[in-house]
């Protein structure tokens, strides 16, 4: 059993926070919300242990078991909640009481929250916690054969079929399921973590017009993070200075000419995305030649600083908003 946390059990490391989520232990107040989501057959049918139809009692029992597991230090079982709204979106569990030093992962996400990448974000965070804090040697999981969404989640987190077959008790279905085992070893996790720490240098500008409005560009369809609003800019190429890269990007994306002397450094973003670490200096630009025009199919918007939060932005950009608001006022 893991010795790193001594007698403190697992509760000491909770909640776990990610970009968009808070992973926290369930409480008796959560029962109704959990029953509403997990009572959906579309969710329950992929699990062996969520009864259908679902009543309060099994969820109350699960909450009690969870508390005991955390006290014993034999696993982590948490609700996936939205950081912004506090809404419960699902649950994720990592348990090593039967397989130490390996742990089994399980999770579900309620139907209103499908398609947002929450499962991947939560499973990745709990996997990281297992390896980094609890010294696991490996994690494994399995899914029903037709649960392709869940297979994609495990793929993204790095769990690959290893040829094994798991005998999964499915008491709520009165059955035992034989499922392909997917696993991630500690060595592979260390390699993946190093890839995620790969530094990408991106340079961006807040163009400010005479009314004090800031120019945002919407990432077009087909690009990563499509639909989000960002500051014009892009990756610094090998052999390029940040200023030269920004001047090039502004010309390519907006058709405007800027001079290095007009680029005033303001602040920077440093953000761990799932597969790279973004370092992004942000410059202020008040003078340029030409009229900003969307050259790459992106939508453009001139936005008052007080309204910047109305535009969904990449996670890295959110801490930049108060800095701009401080500088420019409302
Ligand atoms: N230009 C710009 N990029 C940003 C901002 N915030 C942020 O996370 N990024 C990220 O930084 C990278 C910018 O690189 P880019 O604009 O040259 O990349 P790209 O879209 O051509 O390529 P990509 O699809 O591989 O990301 C993207 O991953 C983008 O999502 C921002 O405010 N401005």
Image (spheres, helix red, strand yellow):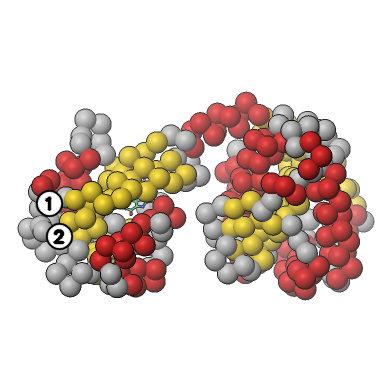
Q: Residue at position x 41%, y 52% from top?
A: 316
- Residue occupying the point 75% across, 37% down: 5
Quadrant assignment, res 290:
bottom left
The structure residue drawn at horizontal position 24% and vertical position 58%, both measured from the top left corner, is 206
Q: In which quadrant will I find the N terminus? A: top right
**Label 1 – label 2 distance at C-alpha:** 7 Å
Q: Position of residue 291 (x, y in %)?
A: 11, 64
Residue at the (72%, 36%) spot, across then down: 134
Q: Give the image location of residue 184, x and y in percent.
A: 66, 34
Which of the two residues, 88 or 321, is positioned nearer the viewer here?
321
Image height of 79 relative to 195, above or below: below
Q: Quadrant of residue 326?
A: bottom left
User: Residue 3, relative to residue 66: is it above or below?
Assistant: above
Name above or below for residue 316 compared with residue 72: below
Q: Is residue 298 visible?
A: no
Q: Which residue is mark 1?
A: 262
Q: Quadrant of the C terminus?
A: bottom left
Q: Pointer 1 and pointer 2: residues touching (CB < 8 Å)? A: yes
> Element at badge 1?
helix
Left or right of 273, for residue 255: left
Secondary structure type for disc 2:
loop
The 10 Å Cα crowd at callout 1, few under 14, some 14 to 19, many 20 or more, is few
Pointer 1 or 2: first along the chain: 1
| Residue 236 position in % (x across, y down) | 26, 39
Residue 202 visible somewhere in the drawing:
yes
Q: Nearer the viewer, residue 231 or 156?
A: 231
Which residue is label 2 attached to?
286
**272 displayed left or right of 46:** left
Q: Position of residue 26 (x, y in %)?
A: 76, 61
């Amino acid at each position: 059993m893991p010795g790193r946390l001594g007698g403190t059990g697992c509760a000491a490391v909770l909640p776990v926070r990610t970009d968009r989520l808070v992973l926290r232990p369930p409480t008796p107040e959560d029962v109704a919300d959990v029953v509403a989501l997990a009572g959906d057959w579309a969710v329950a049918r992929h699990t062996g242990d969520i009864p259908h139809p679902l009543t309060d009692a099994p969820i109350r029992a699960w909450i009690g078991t969870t508390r005991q597991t955390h006290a014993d230090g034999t696993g982590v079982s948490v609700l996936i909640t939205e950081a912004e709204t506090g809404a419960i979106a699902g649950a994720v569990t990592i348990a090593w009481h039967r397989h130490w030093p390996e742990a089994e992962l399980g999770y579900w996400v309620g139907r209103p929250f499908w398609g947002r990448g929450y499962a991947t974000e939560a499973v990745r965070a709990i996997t990281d916690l297992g390896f980094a804090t609890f010294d696991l040697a490996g994690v494994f999981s399995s899914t029903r054969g037709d649960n392709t969404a869940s297979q994609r989640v495990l793929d993204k987190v790095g769990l690959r079929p290893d040829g094994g077959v798991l005998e999964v008790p499915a008491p709520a279905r009165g059955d035992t399921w034989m499922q392909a085992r997917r696993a991630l070893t500690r060595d592979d996790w260390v390699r993946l973590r190093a890839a995620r720490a790969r530094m990408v240098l991106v340079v961006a500008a807040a163009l400010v017009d005479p009314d004090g409005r800031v120019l945002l560009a919407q990432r077009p369809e087909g690009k990563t993070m499509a639909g989000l609003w960002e500051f014009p800019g892009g990756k610094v190429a090998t052999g390029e200075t940040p200023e030269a890269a920004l001047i090039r990007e502004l010309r390519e994306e907006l058709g405007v000419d800027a001079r290095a002397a007009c680029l005033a450094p303001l602040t920077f973003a440093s953000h761990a995305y799932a597969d790279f670490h973004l370092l992004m200096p942000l410059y202020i630009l008040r003078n340029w030649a030409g009229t900003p025009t969307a050259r790459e199919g992106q939508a453009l918007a001139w936005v008052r600083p007080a309204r910047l939060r109305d535009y969904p932005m990449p996670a890295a950009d959110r801490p930049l908003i108060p800095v701009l608001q401080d500088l420019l006022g409302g």
